Image (cartoon, coloured by chain):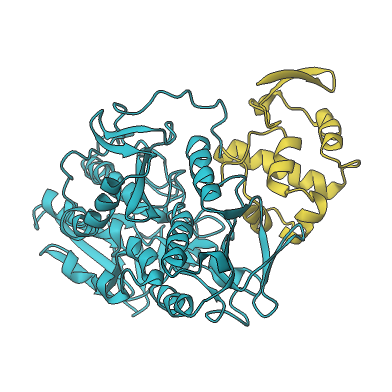
C-alpha cells in the first residue's frame, strides 16, 4: 500500500492502484484518476457508471462485475467497454475510488 | 401446531438440510417438504470424469427422493414463484404451499443463451460444456475422435460452480492426450476472465506453474463477448480473438428462474442476497439460503454447502425458537483438484484464509496445495461419502464445519486478498 496525493489530497492505494478506503475519494479526483487510465474526458455516461459503482460498493460491500453492471447500471456491456476499453469493472473501480471488485471467487 | 418448513431444491443443500432438520424435529413439531422439478440427483463432481471415459452419467445420477429420510415429503414440480409477502410458494402444478420457514436451495443454473453465439451453430458439435450430464456425454464422444488441433477451455465469467473444475479438465486433458500418444498434436489453451489461473494468489501461482509445466497456454483477463462456433473463435468484449477447433465453455451462471419471477427475492442474476455468516436471507427473516443459490462470497461448491449445513439448521432452529441467530459460517471450502496420473491436490480455505501449503486437517493429514496419490484416493472415496454421509446430513469424522488452522503454513495474506 502506498500513500499518494491526488487532486491535492493524500489517499491510500494498493499495489494494483485500488483505493483501500473508499471514503478518501472525492469527485474532484476522478478526472486525474481517469487520465492515468488513458481516459482524457469523463462524459456523463462515465459518471453514471462511476456513481453506480460507488453506490453498489457502499450498499453491498463490493463493486459489481461487468455482467452485473450491464444488467443494472442502465449502460450495456458493449457500451461499458467503449467507455472503459481496458475492462470496465476494474478501471471504473479505480476511477471511482473503491477496492477491487471481488466478483471472482 | 407443527411448523411448516418448505425447502426449494432437492440437491446437495436441500437434501442435507431436510435430513438434518428431520432428525432435529419430531413429526409433530415440524413438517418438512422438499420441492424439485425432477427426481434426478446428479453427483456433480462426477461430471468432470465423464468426458474422459473415466465415469459414465448413469453412475452419477440417483433418485432425489431416495436420499431423503422418512418423514420428509417430496413434491416433484416446477416452481412458478414465491410470494415472500404472503409466505407462500406457488408451484407450477398449480398447488400453493404455505410456510413458516422457507429454505432456498435451488442452486445455480447455466445460462449459455446469455452469451452471443454460444448456443448457435457449432453448439454440441465443436462447442461443449461438461457442466451438464448431456454436455459431458456429448463431449466424451467428441474427445474420442479428436486427433489433433486446438482445444480451448473458456470460463465466460465468474461466479461458476466449482472454480477449480476448468483447471482439472485441462490437467485431465493433458493426461488423456498423453496416454493416447497424441499430446504433441494437441494444443491446450485456457481462456479465463481472471488475471491468473485461480482466484486466490498463492494457489493461483502454484496452479499457474502446473499449467506451464504441462505446456497449457493461459490467456488471462479474457471476457468472452461472443462464441463463433462456425468460425471457430472466441471473441472478447475488448475484441481479442482466441481460435479453437474444439471449445469447452463454462457458461454464465444465474440462480433458478423462479427467483426472477418472485418479486423481492433475488438480485439481477437471480441469486438470493444472503448474510455471509448466518445464512439468513437479506430479503425476509423467515427465508434462509444454502449452497449455490446464495450470494455469499464463498466458492459455489458442494463442500461449502456441506459446511453451511450445520449453521443453517442451527439458525432455523433459533429463528423458530425466537432466539438470536449465530454468525457461525466461516466460508470454509475444501476442494480436491484432480491433476491426472492418479494424483490430486487439496485446497482448504475460508473467507479470511486463502489456500496455502501444509496438511489437512492438522499437522498430520493430507498434503495441501501439493500433488499426491493420497489426495486422488480421497477424491475417489468422496463419491461414496457424498451419498452415504454428506447427503444424510451426518458430520464427517475428522472434518469439522469450521476451517482448521493447524497444519497450514503461516503465509501472510496480501493486504488486498480481493479477488
Q: Is residue B331 above or below residue B4?
A: above
B263 or B62: nearer the eye?
B62
Q: Is residue B324 left or right of residue B219?
A: left
Quadrant housing residue B156: bottom right
Instruction: Tally the numbered discs.
Output: 0
| Image quarter (top left, top right, bottom left or bottom right) of the N terminus of chain B | bottom left
Q: Is residue B88 left or right of residue B310?
A: right
Report the residue at 54% width, 45% height from top. Answer: B208
Quadrant housing residue A34: top right
Report the residue at 18% width, 45% height from top. Answer: B396
B38 or B313: nearer the eye?
B38
Q: Is residue B255 above or below residue A51?
A: below
Quadrant housing residue B308: top left
- Image coords of residue B338 (percent x, y): 37, 54
Q: Colour of chain A?
A: yellow
Report the residue at 24% width, 46% height from top. Answer: B313
Report the residue at 85% width, 31% height from top. Answer: A32
- Image coords of residue A15 (percent x, y): 67, 27
Note the chain letter of the cyan one.
B
Q: Is residue B379 left or right of residue B203?
A: left
| Image quarter (top left, top right, bottom left or bottom right) of the C terminus of chain B | top right
Q: Is residue B43 above or below residue A66?
A: below
A6 or B33: nearer the eye?
A6
- Image coords of residue B355 (percent x, y): 42, 36
Amino acid at each position: 500500500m502506498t500513500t499518494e496525493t491526488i487532486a491535492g489530497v493524500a489517499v491510500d492505494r494498493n499495489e494494483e492502484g485500488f483505493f483501500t478506503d473508499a471514503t478518501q475519494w472525492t469527485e474532484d479526483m476522478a478526472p486525474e484518476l481517469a487520465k492515468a487510465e488513458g481516459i482524457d474526458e469523463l462524459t456523463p455516461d462515465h459518471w453514471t457508471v462511476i456513481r453506480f459503482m460507488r453506490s453498489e460498493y457502499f450498499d453491498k460491500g463490493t463493486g459489481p462485475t461487468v455482467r452485473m453492471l450491464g444488467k443494472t447500471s442502465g449502460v450495456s456491456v458493449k457500451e461499458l467497454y467503449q467507455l472503459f476499453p481496458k475492462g470496465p469493472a476494474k478501471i471504473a473501480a479505480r476511477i471511482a475510488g473503491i477496492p477491487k471488485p471481488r466478483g471472482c471467487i | 401446531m407443527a411448523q411448516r418448513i418448505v425447502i426449494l431444491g432437492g440437491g446437495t443443500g436441500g437434501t442435507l438440510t431436510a435430513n438434518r432438520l428431520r432428525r432435529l424435529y419430531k413429526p409433530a413439531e415440524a413438517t418438512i417438504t422438499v420441492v424439485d422439478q425432477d427426481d434426478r440427483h446428479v453427483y456433480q463432481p462426477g461430471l468432470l470424469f465423464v468426458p474422459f471415459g473415466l465415469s459414465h452419467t448413469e453412475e452419477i445420477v440417483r433418485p432425489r427422493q431416495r436420499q431423503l429420510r422418512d418423514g420428509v415429503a417430496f413434491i416433484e414440480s416446477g416452481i412458478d414463484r414465491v410470494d415472500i409477502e404472503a409466505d407462500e410458494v406457488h408451484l407450477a402444478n398449480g398447488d400453493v404451499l404455505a410456510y413458516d420457514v422457507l429454505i432456498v436451495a435451488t442452486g445455480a443454473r447455466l445460462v449459455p443463451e446469455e452469451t452471443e453465439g454460444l448456443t448457435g451453430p457449432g453448439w454440441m458439435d465443436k462447442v461443449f460444456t461438461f457442466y451438464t450430464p448431456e454436455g459431458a456425454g456429448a463431449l466424451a464422444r467428441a474427445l474420442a475422435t479428436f486427433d489433433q488441433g486446438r482445444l480451448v477451455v473458456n470460463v465466460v465469467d465468474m461466479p461458476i460452480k466449482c472454480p477449480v473444475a476448468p483447471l482439472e479438465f485441462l490437467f485431465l486433458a493433458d493426461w488423456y492426450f498423453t496416454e493416447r500418444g497424441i499430446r504433441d498434436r494437441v494444443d491446450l489453451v485456457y481462456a479465463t476472465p481472471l488475471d491468473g489461473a485461480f482466484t486466490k494468489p498463492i494457489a493461483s501461482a502454484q496452479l499457474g506453474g502446473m499449467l506451464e509445466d504441462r505446456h497449457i497456454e493461459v490467456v488471462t483477463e479474457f471476457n468472452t463477448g461472443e462464441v463463433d462456433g462456425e468460425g471457430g473463435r472466441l471473441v472478447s468484449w475488448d475484441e481479442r480473438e482466441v481460435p479453437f477447433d474444439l471449445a469447452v465453455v463454462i457458461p454464465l451462471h444465474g440462480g433458478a428462474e423462479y427467483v426472477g419471477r418472485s418479486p423481492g427475492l433475488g438480485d439481477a442474476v437471480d441469486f438470493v442476497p444472503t448474510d455471509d455468516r448466518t445464512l439468513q436471507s437479506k430479503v425476509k427473516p423467515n427465508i434462509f439460503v444454502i449452497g449455490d443459490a446464495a450470494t455469499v462470497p464463498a466458492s459455489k461448491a458442494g463442500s461449502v454447502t456441506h459446511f453451511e449445513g450445520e449453521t443453517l439448521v442451527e439458525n432455523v432452529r433459533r429463528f423458530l425458537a425466537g432466539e438470536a441467530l449465530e454468525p457461525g459460517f466461516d466460508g470454509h471450502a475444501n476442494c480436491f483438484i484432480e491433476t491426472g496420473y492418479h494424483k490430486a491436490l487439496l485446497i482448504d480455505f475460508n473467507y479470511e484464509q486463502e489456500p496455502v501449503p501444509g496438511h489437512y486437517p492438522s499437522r498430520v493429514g493430507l498434503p495441501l496445495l501439493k500433488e499426491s496419490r493420497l489426495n486422488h484416493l480421497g477424491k475417489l472415496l468422496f463419491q461414496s461419502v457424498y451419498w452415504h454421509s454428506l447427503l444424510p446430513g451426518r458430520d464427517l469424522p475428522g472434518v469439522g464445519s469450521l476451517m482448521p488452522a493447524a497444519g497450514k503454513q503461516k503465509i501472510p495474506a496480501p493486504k488486498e486478498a480481493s479477488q
